């Protein structure tokens, strides 16, 4: 008989020990809620539902649940009743557990440990976990409900509070074990589409299908086709109407998320500035795909672009590298921790699903949030930015660290508008042998009809239903909790180890990730290769019984790959999976009859022609109108204290040190990271790009960098894209990338750009997208930088009507490329007294949308941020300059280089001093083109500029190589600790490094006190 | 003779590739061996001369780092491990591997040589409450009989953990470890003279990244053959992995490249590699 046993564990408080979990909560309360308490204690609880006798379980508490050296365990009792460890009653207790059906990773791990001790226990046994915090010294004024709210997310967790009275009476409320009530399997329903247009729209909206009228009508028309009807009749399907399985499958496959309908749309574009009127037949094909395919004809290293889960380039003689970046914005808004974690582990699977499987070797994380110190009102249902930051960071940290993939590069950008929708970009670089031991090139999938399709990894549950369609809608108060789930990195790690071994054994003929759209997308996409598949949903293992066919087909439950083997290899594959304790199930076979055929046991539940499924979606017809935004111009004040401006800029969240967050990522597992996120003798200077040497014993390198500047969209989204690409390239040049072998990824995050009642400015937002794409093409062609993969997320808005918040149009440009030898690279920290400091590139009078413009406007000493936004002039010439600079780094002539971006030269120079713990004296004279004043030179963000430090013995050689590209000697590294910036005879800035450091490091350290 | 090394993997171990690589670089023949291959009997530890339990997040560190894998080993591999130790073969546990060895009871182990699989110490949450990746400086105890660290004085290498604070129930337990020379390595202030950084008084964060008792970073068993440490010496197998490598007076001529055939690192060998070479040399001379 199944019964629930309760185990609690709490830290012993012996000498030198403290309750660290509790202490973290105490500091967090002080930091985020301004509630000071004297002590917080923590108790971890386990509820074991099993057929093992309670007394037997309680006798083994120290063998499973509790570390007897440092913890005390209790079987059947509450820890709080232990008067030795809790000799005073707390003022308040809060216990938090997951809701039924939510992934409980510690619970699954505990269950594994439970089976180690009780192998005979029923396989139906379950362990649920909870945590109880006991608070001491709670101020009278504390709103305990609010406190509880801040400690859990009611979408996925439940909390109970023990009041002061209950604590005094020692009647602590106990959190109980709950299970999701079993649902009943429902046979597929016939969905009548012979209804009015209004009803079609209603059906789409209420069913969260996210299909527009024309798409619904296209589906309606499909079921009127007599040929379709007779084929359906033969299979026993309703001939004249879709089943719910089919409609859901079409909704997922045709979602904006999966089909990128806006990038594929036909756009009538009007430019009110120039009078241009034109028609663009797919932004993607015109401005992204075409340039890359053109470049592919000229180089031999672009192996696989656009069609696979990530873009693949040849790297050294034996290996290829690939990269993919994704966003996970909507889930991260609802549950920052779970949403972000599924983001990172999801993009890892994209790499694993590239070609015949690649090994993820590096992650990048770029986040956009509201300001962490935001004081204003928050719309319903949205979390405070500091909580989003903590949650997203924790999710990505857990996902990356536990998967053994180093997080090597990233950024955090802040803007009020990201309160409406945080952007969570996760990228992963993969490594694969160019050829497998059996001789097949690893970047080419080789499926055949008759191959067996396995679902591999986690089971399917009700979690994650409608992720793809949900992310194609704006966030509202009613957004569903089923769209949220929590990743399980350890299950995925096992899956990853096993899959890569299967690859090397030659067992895989085809593989892809189970992400958005679940099996319907993964098998559906792979079935395109052979032109057909037959799926049996009854073979799909479930987390809980009773899921209906459509739910099984579209659920996005995590940690799953879809993988095919030949029939001959299937058994060897199953044996390998068993060794790794990874669940695999034969769920489908590939066919070549042109059908996406789904059965549940013997019953057909869906049949869609492959062609209709993939190519049936009608092209959107959209219009865009560009009218140049005219924000009030930024006019710097006549008199200014530039020392103070530098300190204020360093403290701005966009510029401030992210070290306290980034240091919590493992950035050097795999023993390959040659340039880490923080550099210098105290490892606190910012790195520009990551440099890794992934083959042990070899010095061949891979460079990874990012560029992102949403601010510039306030003036021109085209300029925003130019600046993002140039920033990524500049960063990569700073470590010495081979500029002739680099590739990029464009990840667009836009507010809804479709004109409608809820988006009255859709035509303008679409025009911003047009300009962004045009500039992307122009820069990438000039830099000979192919985009090999990308993604777009097009509904980054919150709410409707007056309180609608739209994000600034944003494109992240991720870059990866080759480096000949990681020993010869540069970092931003100043190295030695006497090092010569040069500015590479010239400053222009470009202060529009600069950090200093926002700073002074917010402070009231300027009226606006408008003006000239940085533009990229003559990019071909800049590329030549970058090549010369990169080569000088590769040749060991330059070991100090830092890119100029937010806050311009002043901030870059300060960061170099902080990193190197050395002062410098520089003169701005001659660093700008004619007409550039002090503001433009010191704080402007003109593109193409890099600060370099050169040792005296290499100076002549470096000058000779770079002088044609705008090279100005600015000054020297000094022996003292002052940063001195002069403009001719005037001293503009003179600050001690310790003051710079204090300003730069204070803002984003949210530890809440000494640790 | 080329010593054979079993590098365990599976269940969330994730430093297996580089741990295999460093043994290969010093002349061993290392193989990644799935824990379940040992559990189900297809492989036996007796085939190997050295066992390494690499870093990672076995079972997600749930229920305490290293506990669940430690339990599997304690219950399923007890005889095999016991025989391995009794045969005088070296074992190393790094980071999560150290946590595993502590929780199986192999470290610090009993005073008598034969393992009894009783847990005597633990590694718990860092005082900061945070997982961190940061570089630390380690000094090595010249009076320790640990075979892995012979001749080492000081190295820099990263810690990457959230639960690295070494604790024992009583200070007399720590006294005994110290008296036996089982305290192999400690976090030290890099400003001190090499070899003089060892101290019992707690060093401030971040010199000691976790608040470990007596600044302990690694310990060995009474035989000196079983060694565990929280920091990652394999992460500094080459100098280009040191965060300061652009600051060194690096050889400027590109002809000092590691020989791709021999995979020797030459001048660019990192200071962590000697630990692995020591064990391989030990096996060559003693087994």
Image: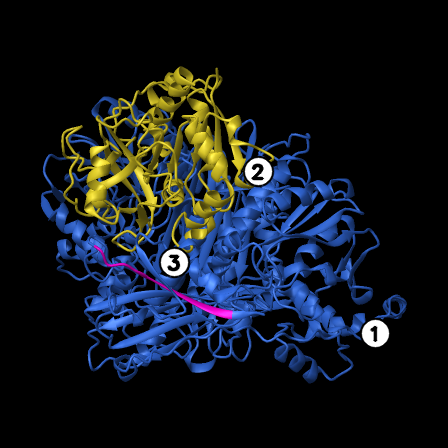
Q: Position of residue A914 (x, y in %)?
A: 20, 44
Q: Which dot, 1 or 2, sits closer to the camera?
A: 2
Same chain assignment for discs 3 and 2: no
Tell me how far mark 1 sits from mark 2, CA to CA.
51 Å
Which numbered tag is attached to residue A238? 1
- Residue where numbered disc 2 is placed: B37
Q: Nearer the viewer, mark 3 or mark 1?
A: 3
In the picture, the quarter occupied by the N terminus of chain A is bottom right
Question: Is any atom of residue A943 visible in this view?
Answer: yes
Q: Quadrant of residue A11?
A: bottom left
In the image, residue A173 lies in the stretch drawn in magenta: no
Q: Which lettered chain is shown in yellow?
A: B
Read off the residue under disc 3: A394
In the image, residue A5 lies in the stretch drawn in magenta: yes
**Residue A891 left/right relative to A979:** right
Query: Which of these two is toward me, A352 or A217?
Result: A352
Q: Which chain is blue?
A: A
The span picked out in magenta is A4-14
Tell me which label, 3 or 1, sits earlier in the chain.
Answer: 1
Classed neighbour count for the residue bearing mark 3: other residues with Cα under 10 Å, few (<14), some (14–19), many (≥20) = many
């Amino acid at each position: 008989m199944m019964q629930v046993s309760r185990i609690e564990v709490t830290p012993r408080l012996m000498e030198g020990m403290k309750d660290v979990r509790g202490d973290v909560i105490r500091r967090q309360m002080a930091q985020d809620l301004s509630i000071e308490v004297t002590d917080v204690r923590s108790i971890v609880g386990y509820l074991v539902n099993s057929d093992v006798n309670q007394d037997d379980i309680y006798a083994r508490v120290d063998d499973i649940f509790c570390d007897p050296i440092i913890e005390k365990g209790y079987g059947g009792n509450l820890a709080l009743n232990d008067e030795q460890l809790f000799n005073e009653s707390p003022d308040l207790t809060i216990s938090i557990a997951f809701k039924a059906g939510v992934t409980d990773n510690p619970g699954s791990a505990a269950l594994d440990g439970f089976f180690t001790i009780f192998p005979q226990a029923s396989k139906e046994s379950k362990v649920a976990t909870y945590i109880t915090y006991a608070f001491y010294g709670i101020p009278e004024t504390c709103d305990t409900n609010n406190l509880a709210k801040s400690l859990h997310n009611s979408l996925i967790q439940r909390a109970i509070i023990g009041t002061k009275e209950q604590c005094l009476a020692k009647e602590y409320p106990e959190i109980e074990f709950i299970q999701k009530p079993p649902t009943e399997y429902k046979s597929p329903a016939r969905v009548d589409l012979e209804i009015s247009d209004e009803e079609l729209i209603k059906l789409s909206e209420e069913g969260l299908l996210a299909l527009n009228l024309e798409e619904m009508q296209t589906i309606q028309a499909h079921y009127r086709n007599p040929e379709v009807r007779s084929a359906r009749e033969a299979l026993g399907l309703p001939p004249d109407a879709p089943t719910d399985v089919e409609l859901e499958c079409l909704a997922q496959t045709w979602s904006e998320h999966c089909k990128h309908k806006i990038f594929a749309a036909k756009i009538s574009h009007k430019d009110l500035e120039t009078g241009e009127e034109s028609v663009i037949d797919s932004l993607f094909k015109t401005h992204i795909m075409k340039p890359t395919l053109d470049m592919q004809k000229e180089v031999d290293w672009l192996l696989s672009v656009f069609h696979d889960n990530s873009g693949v380039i040849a790297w050294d003689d034996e290996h290829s590298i690939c990269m993919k970046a994704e966003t996970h914005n909507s889930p991260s808004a609802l549950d920052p921790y779970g949403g972000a974690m599924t983001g990172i582990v999801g993009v890892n699977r994209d790499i694993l699903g590239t070609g015949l499987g690649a090994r993820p070797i590096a992650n990048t994380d770029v986040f956009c949030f509201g300001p962490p110190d935001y004081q204003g009102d928050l719309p319903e249902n949205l979390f405070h930015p500091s909580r989003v930051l903590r949650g997203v960071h924790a999710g990505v940290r857990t996902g990356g660290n536990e998967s053994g993939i180093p997080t090597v590069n990233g950024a955090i950008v802040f803007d009020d508008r990201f309160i409406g929708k945080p952007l969570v970009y996760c990228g992963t670089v993969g490594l694969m042998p160019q050829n497998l031991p059996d001789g097949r090139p690893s970047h080419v999938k080789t499926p055949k009809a008759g191959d067996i399709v396995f679902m591999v990894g986690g089971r399917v549950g009700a979690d994650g239903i409608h992720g793809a369609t949900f992310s194609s809608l704006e966030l509202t108060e009613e957004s569903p909790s089923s769209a949220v789930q929590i990743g399980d990195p350890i299950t995925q790690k096992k899956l990853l180890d096993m899959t890569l071994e299967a690859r090397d054994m030659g067992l895989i003929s085809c593989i892809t990730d189970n992400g958005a759209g679940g099996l319907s997308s993964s098998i559906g996409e792979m079935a395109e290769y052979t032109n057909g598949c037959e799926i049996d949903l009854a073979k799909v293992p479930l987390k809980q019984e009773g899921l209906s066919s459509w739910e099984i087909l579209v659920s996005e439950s995590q940690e799953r790959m879809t993988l095919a083997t030949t029939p001959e290899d299937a058994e060897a594959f199953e044996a390998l999976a068993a060794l790794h304790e990874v669940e695999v199930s034969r769920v489908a076979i590939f066919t070549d009859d042109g059908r996406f055929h789904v059965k549940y046991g013997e019953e057909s539940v869906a049949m869609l022609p492959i062609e209709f499924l993939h190519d049936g979606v009608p092209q959107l017809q959209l219009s865009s109108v560009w009218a140049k935004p005219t924000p009030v111009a930024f006019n710097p004040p006549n008199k200014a204290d530039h020392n103070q401006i530098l300190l204020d800029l360093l403290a701005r969240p966009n510029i401030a040190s992210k070290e306290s967050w980034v240091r919590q990522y493992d950035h050097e597992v795999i023993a390959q990271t040659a340039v880490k996120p923080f550099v210098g003798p105290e490892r606190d200077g910012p790195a520009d790009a990551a440099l890794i040497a992934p083959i042990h014993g070899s010095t061949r390198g891979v460079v990874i960098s990012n560029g992102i500047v949403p601010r510039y969209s306030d003036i021109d989204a085209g300029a925003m894209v130019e600046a993002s690409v140039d920033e990524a390239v500049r960063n990569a040049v700073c470590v010495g990338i081979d500029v002739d072998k680099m590739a990029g990824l464009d990840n667009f995050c836009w507010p809804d750009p479709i004109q409608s009642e809820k988006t009255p400015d859709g035509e303008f937002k679409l025009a911003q997208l047009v300009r962004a794409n045009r500039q992307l093409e122009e820069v990438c062609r000039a830099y000979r930088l192919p985009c090999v993969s990308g993604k777009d997320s097009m509904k980054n808005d919150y709410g409707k009507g007056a309180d609608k918040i739209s994000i600034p149009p944003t494109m992240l440009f991720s870059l990866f490329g080759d480096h000949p030898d990681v020993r010869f690279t540069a970092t931003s920290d100043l190295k030695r007294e006497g090092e010569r400091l040069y500015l590479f590139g010239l400053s222009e009078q470009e202060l529009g949308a600069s950090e200093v413009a926002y700073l002074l406007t917010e402070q009231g000493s300027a009226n606006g941020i408008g003006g000239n936004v940085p533009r990229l002039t003559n990019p071909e010439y800049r590329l030549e300059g970058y090549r010369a600079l990169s080569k000088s780094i590769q040749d060991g002539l330059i070991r100090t280089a830092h890119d100029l971006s937010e806050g311009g030269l002043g901030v870059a120079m300060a960061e170099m001093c902080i990193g190197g713990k050395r002062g410098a004296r520089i003169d701005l004279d001659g660093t700008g083109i004619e007409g550039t004043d002090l503001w433009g030179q010191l704080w402007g963000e003109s593109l193409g500029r890099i600060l370099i430090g050169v040792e005296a013995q290499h100076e002549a050689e470096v000058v000779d190589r770079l002088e044609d590209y705008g090279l100005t000697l600015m000054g020297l590294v000094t022996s003292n600790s002052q940063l001195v910036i002069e403009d001719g005879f005037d001293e503009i800035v003179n600050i001690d490094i310790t003051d710079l450091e204090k300003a730069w490091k204070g803002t984003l350290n949210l530890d809440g006190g000494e640790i | 003779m080329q010593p054979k090394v079993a590098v365990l993997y599976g269940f969330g171990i994730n430093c297996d590739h580089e741990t295999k690589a460093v043994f290969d670089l010093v002349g061993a023949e290392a193989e990644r061996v799935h824990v379940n291959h040992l559990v189900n009997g297809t492989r036996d530890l007796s085939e190997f001369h050295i066992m390494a339990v690499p870093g990672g997040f076995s079972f997600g560190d749930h229920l305490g780092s290293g506990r669940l894998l430690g339990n599997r080993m304690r219950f399923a591999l007890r005889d095999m491990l016991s025989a391995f130790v009794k045969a005088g073969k070296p074992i190393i546990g790094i980071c999560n591997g150290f946590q595993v060895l502590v929780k199986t009871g192999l470290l610090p182990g009993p005073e008598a040589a034969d393992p009894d699989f009783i847990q005597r110490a633990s590694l718990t949450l860092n005082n900061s409450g945070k997982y961190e990746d940061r570089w630390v400086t380690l000094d090595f105890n010249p009076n320790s009989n640990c075979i892995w660290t012979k001749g080492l004085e000081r190295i820099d290498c990263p810690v990457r953990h959230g639960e690295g604070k070494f604790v024992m129930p009583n200070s007399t337990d720590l006294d005994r470890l110290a008296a036996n020379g089982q305290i192999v390595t400690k976090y030290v202030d890099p400003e001190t003279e090499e070899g003089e950084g060892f101290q019992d008084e707690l060093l401030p964060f971040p010199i000691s990244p976790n608040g470990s008792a007596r600044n302990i970073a690694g310990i060995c068993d009474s035989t000196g053959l079983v060694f565990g440490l929280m920091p990652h010496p394999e992460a500094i197998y080459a100098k280009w992995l040191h965060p300061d490598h652009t600051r060194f007076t690096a050889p400027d001529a590109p002809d000092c490249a590691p020989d791709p055939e021999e995979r020797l690192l030459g001048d660019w060998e990192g200071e962590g590699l000697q630990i692995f070479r020591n064990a391989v040399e030990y096996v060559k001379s003693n087994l």
